[in-house]
Amino acid sequence: MQKWTQQVRTVTAFSKEASMTLADHLPESAIRTRAHATDWRDAVRLAGEGLVAQGVTTDAYTQEMIEAIERLGPYIVIAPGFALAHSRPSPAVLATGFSWVGLAEPVEFGSEANDPVRLVVGLAALDHDAHIEAMSSLAGVLADDAVLAAAMAADSPSAVRAALGAEPEHDPIREEETK
């Protein structure tokens, strides 16, 4: 991870005061822990499902991510054990957001240097500026080994969000049930 985080320090420096944090754009509906994927396509589909679940993309974006990898190779596997599933901004992107897929068993993407992958983060960005801001917030998490380790070890979406420093999500139904 260190090599990749050094490469994105330029992005982070460009956007020192990024208003977007990873946790801000990562609702529980976009997080899967201990997920099972049969291959890299399945892992990317899971990341795409998280983006769709929170309403930031349509299903077409998931297919665009898979087609980009088929065309360009495993360019999304940017660090040992870590893939950043994304594609170009398109009409299938409705808002900027992330998804998080921690895999129960790692999968191979075909990256000699960085396989097997245990964590797939999905990224959808409306435009170049949103992409830079999103990368900046992600770099902050990846640069902090303790935060990343805690988030990867988390066994529930709420535990992932807590590890990333998020406030618990407001759930009026659960709150009513506990009264």
Image (cartoon, rainbow, N blue to C red):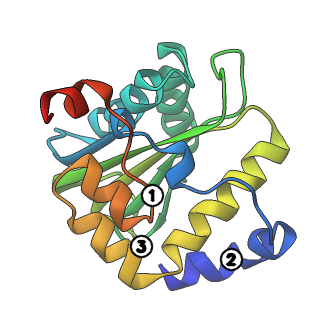
The mark lying in front, picked from 1 and 3, is 1
Q: Residues within 10 Å of mark 2 (few under 14, many from 20)?
A: few
Precedes in sequence: disc 2 or disc 1: 2
The mark lying in front, picked from 2 and 1, is 1
- Towards the viewer: 50 or 89: 50
- Towards the viewer: 82 or 170: 170
Q: Position of residue 134 (x, y in %)?
A: 67, 52
Above-or-below relation of 37 to 3: above
Precedes in sequence: disc 2 or disc 3: 2
Tag 2: amino acid: Gln
- Residue shown at 77%/54% (left/top)? 132
The mark lying in front, picked from 2 and 3, is 2
Tag 3: amino acid: Ala
Q: Which residue is mark 2?
A: 7
Q: Which residue is mark 1?
A: 166
- Say which element carries label 2: helix
| Left or right position of 65 against 47 | right
